Image (tube, rainbow, N blue to C red):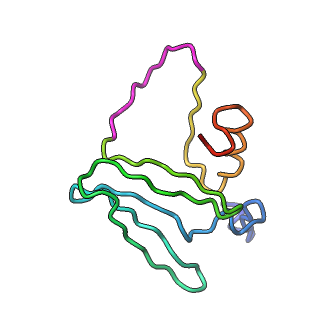
Amino acid sequence: MFGLVIGADAHLFENRLAYQLDGEVHVFHTNDRLTAFTLRGSNDSGFRVDTVLLSDKAEEARIRVGFPADSSHFDVTVSSDAPIPASVYDDGKPIVAMSDIESGFGAFRQFLVVHGIADAALN
């Protein structure tokens, strides 16, 4: 709150592409179908939402996720089946937990690769 009072601004790595909304995808399960809603546009030109039916049987589909700061991308399989995973694990292996990384995707991706959790292509 103090930052807002004094007029501070968040620059997020000084790279506007790190927090660009154009291309942000949200997938919902509606009427037994997986549907992707992609935000398009900008603050200057205005926004619209592109809607794409991913699956007509509410099973699973693949979507491409992009990272505008370096034009990289990767594919994600989305599924309407969202089982609740176990909350206690005892397999002797390390666990990585992540939350809402927002514009920190670049740093998060670097963390995954450096620690051998994923390769450079995010496999």
Q: Tell me the residue at 57%/69% (across/down).
A: 21
Q: Tell me the residue at 43%/74% (across/down).
A: 49
Q: Main secondary structure of the magenta part?
A: loop
Q: Is residue 2 in the magenta section? A: no
Q: Tell me the residue at 59%/31% (across/down).
A: 96
Task: Examine the rendered structure and indicate whether residue 48 appears above or below residue 51.
Answer: below
Q: Tell me the residue at 71%/48% (across/down).
A: 107
Task: Examine the rendered structure and indicate whether residue 25 appears above or below residue 97.
Answer: below
Task: Provide residue 97's location: percent of width, then percent of height.
Answer: 56, 34
Q: Quadrant of the C terminus?
A: top right
Task: Examine the rendered structure and indicate whether residue 113 appears above or below residue 17.
Answer: above
Task: Provide residue 59's location: percent of width, then percent of height.
Answer: 29, 48
Task: Provide residue 106's location: percent of width, then percent of height.
Answer: 70, 52
Q: Is residue 86 in the magenta section? A: yes
| Residue bounds of the magenta highlight | 82-93
> Is residue 3 found left or right of 50 in the rendered image?
right
